[in-house]
Image: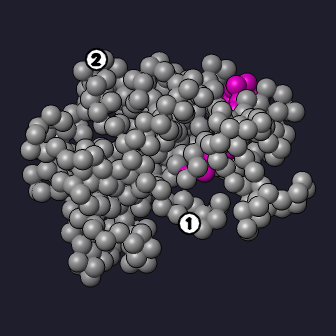
């Protein structure tokens, strides 16, 4: 499980950086201790598995600390982002029958959250870890079957779905992502501001922690009840970035920044997914950001389907499939459609002769 890996690196390389959040670095020792303190908070209040915990925190760093602590205690977490996004309709859509608690933290904009939880009979925890002592992973009174994390799909591949990331799924997914993108203990991976309920925000963020590397998180923050925005290109000002992932929409925002707003970094590998880039975006990204540009094709439920190095403009015409993946275009009856006819993408792990897919 991700939590166990973080604690493992905290023992082996305690001073190595695990995460940088809005410019503030945390070592593996500090990260593991924060998770252990959160474990103590939840365990002392009886929040041990099974069941579900709904996280309504906008701060990505706090999400990871709370979620990894709760999962290690046996609960399964689901993130809905800021409290403003939580509604009775959303909770009904989740369809979870054993919601043990709704979790937020001080400083969040939470108008209506208290009343909503009272109306639905849900326990609302406003979590502050001040004064808590750490609860080690080995404490037998807090050992339960490990929990998972539920991702929420956007519905771009069909009906919106919920995808459970179990510890076993985590292990398989992280191994694949690490191998394809060349992530190791020397990596600093920037994930910009991908949401924690998305495949991109969850899977990519955790990749470096599986091998002892570091993740860079950048987002706007809430100060005195006011959300402070940030410009995506500011993440590129952080020194030492070796890898980065973003969407075409965020790439467009970065490329709209004035000339000289951020440095070119040809030691960085940049992967763009969650949509297709235009040819102009490819040319500008290679000219202004890095020459090492990739495109990934993925879905929340299917994970990585293709990962393509854009060495030439011709490469933009093709997807290079992840080993072991087979892609077909099918109709509503799940039958392959003839070439040049429109259908839906079906992805399987069966072997086959398909090794690249026209865009």
Question: As drawn, is 299 to the left or to the right of 96?
Answer: right
Query: Residue 2 at x, y = what percent?
Result: 35, 36
Q: Which residue is mark 2?
A: 12
Residue 188 visible in the current orientation: yes
Which residue sits at x=13%, y=50%?
43
Q: Quadrant for residue 122, please give it.
A: bottom left
Report x, y in % for residue 338.
88, 57
- The residue positioned 57% from the left and 61% from the top of the image is 154
| Alpha carbons under labels 1 and 2: distance apart | 41 Å
> Which residue in the protein does label 1 denote?
160
Picture quarter with the N terminus: top left
Nearer to us in this view, 328 or 143? 328
Q: What span is colored magenta in the figure?
A: 285-300
Q: Which mark is residue 228?
A: none
Q: Is residue 258 visible?
A: no
Residue 292: within the magenta? Answer: yes
Identify the image quadrant of residue 351: top right
């Amino acid at each position: 499980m991700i939590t166990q890996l973080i604690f493992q690196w905290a023992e082996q390389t305690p001073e190595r950086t695990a995460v940088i959040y809005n410019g503030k670095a945390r070592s593996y020792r500090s990260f593991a201790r924060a998770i252990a303190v959160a474990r103590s908070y939840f365990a002392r209040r009886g929040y041990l598995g099974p069941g579900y915990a709904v996280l309504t925190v906008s701060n990505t760093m706090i999400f990871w600390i709370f979620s990894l602590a709760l999962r290690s205690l046996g609960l399964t977490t689901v993130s809905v982002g800021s409290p403003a996004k939580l509604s009775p309709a959303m909770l009904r859509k989740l369809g979870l029958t054993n919601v043990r608690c709704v979790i937020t933290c001080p400083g969040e904009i939470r108008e209506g959250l208290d009343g909503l939880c009272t109306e639905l009979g849900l326990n609302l925890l406003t979590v502050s870890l001040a004064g808590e002592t750490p609860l080690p992973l080995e404490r037998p009174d807090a050992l339960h079957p490990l929990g998972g994390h539920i991702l929420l799909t956007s519905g771009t591949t069909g009906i919106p779905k919920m995808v459970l990331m179990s510890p076993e799924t985590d292990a398989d997914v992280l191994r694949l992502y690490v191998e394809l993108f060349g992530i190791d203990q020397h990596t600093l991976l920037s994930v910009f501001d991908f949401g924690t309920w998305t495949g991109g925000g969850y899977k990519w963020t955790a990749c470096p922690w599986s091998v002892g590397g570091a993740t860079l998180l950048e987002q706007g923050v809430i100060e005195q009840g006011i959300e402070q925005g940030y410009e995506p290109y500011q993440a590129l000002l952080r020194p030492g970035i070796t890898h980065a992932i973003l969407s075409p929409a965020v790439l467009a925002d970065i490329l709209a920044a004035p000339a000289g707003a951020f440095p070119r970094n040809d030691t960085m590998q940049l992967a763009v997914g969650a949509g297709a880039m235009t040819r102009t975006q490819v040319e500008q990204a290679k000219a202004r950001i890095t020459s090492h540009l990739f495109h990934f094709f993925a879905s929340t439920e299917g994970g990585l389907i293709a990962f393509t190095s854009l060495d030439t403009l011709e490469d933009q015409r093709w997807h290079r499939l992840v080993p072991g993946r087979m892609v077909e275009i099918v109709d509503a009856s799940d039958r392959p459609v003839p070439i040049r006819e429109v259908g839906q993408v079906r992805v399987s792990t069966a072997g086959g002769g398909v090794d690249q897919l026209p865009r």
